[in-house]
Image (cartoon, rainbow, N blue to C red):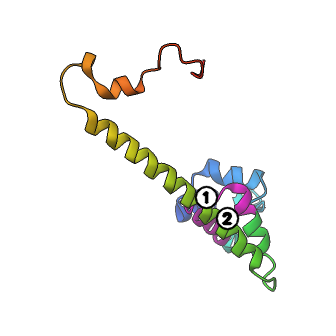
Amino acid sequence: MQIGELGRATATKVETIRYYEQTGLLPPPARTKANYRHYGENHLARLSFIRRARDLGFPIERVRALLDLSDDRGRDCATIDRIATEHLREVDRKIADLSALRRELSTLIASCEGGTVAECRILEALAPVVGDTHADV
């Protein structure tokens, strides 16, 4: 199949496929006599794996590690478990951070009593404190 077909089959942009080839995540395809890239079932399977891992939020480096590990089918999967567990911890940290952010925003919104912009509690809370030596410049 050609690159466009591979892209459609995996919902991946052509530029992304080329990027994965350049970075070595996807092996280079064979070329036709007309010099078109020709992708096989192994490319489809590997790109589907990459897409699923990326959809689950795995960073490229971890996708690469998982792909390398998946190439050795007889290997113990403890390293794969460790990679997935580390990723889950990061997801949990992000969820905790987003939950804290949600609580803070909810409190800000609840403090709003209507009125004019000059009296807006949300804008007041977002404004820098005058004389704050810790403010970013």
Near-viewer residue (11 or 32): 11
Q: Point out the image quarter for the C terminus.
A: top right
Residue at image x 75%, y 62%?
64
The reply to whether residue 36 is in sight is no
Near-viewer residue (5 or 134): 134
**Position in image of residue 98 (x %, y %):** 47, 50
Name the residue tied to disc 1: 90
Of all residues shown, which one is farthest toward the left?
115
Picture quarter containing residue 12?
A: bottom right
Task: Determine whether, in the image, residue 34 is placed left or right of residue 130.
Answer: right
Name the residue tied to disc 2: 86
Q: Amino acid at mark 1?
A: Glu
Picture quarter containing residue 25?
A: bottom right
Residue at image x 61%, y 63%?
89
Of all residues shown, which one is farthest toward the bottom?
74
Q: Secondary structure at mark 2?
A: helix
Near-viewer residue (127 or 59): 127
Near-viewer residue (127 or 91): 127
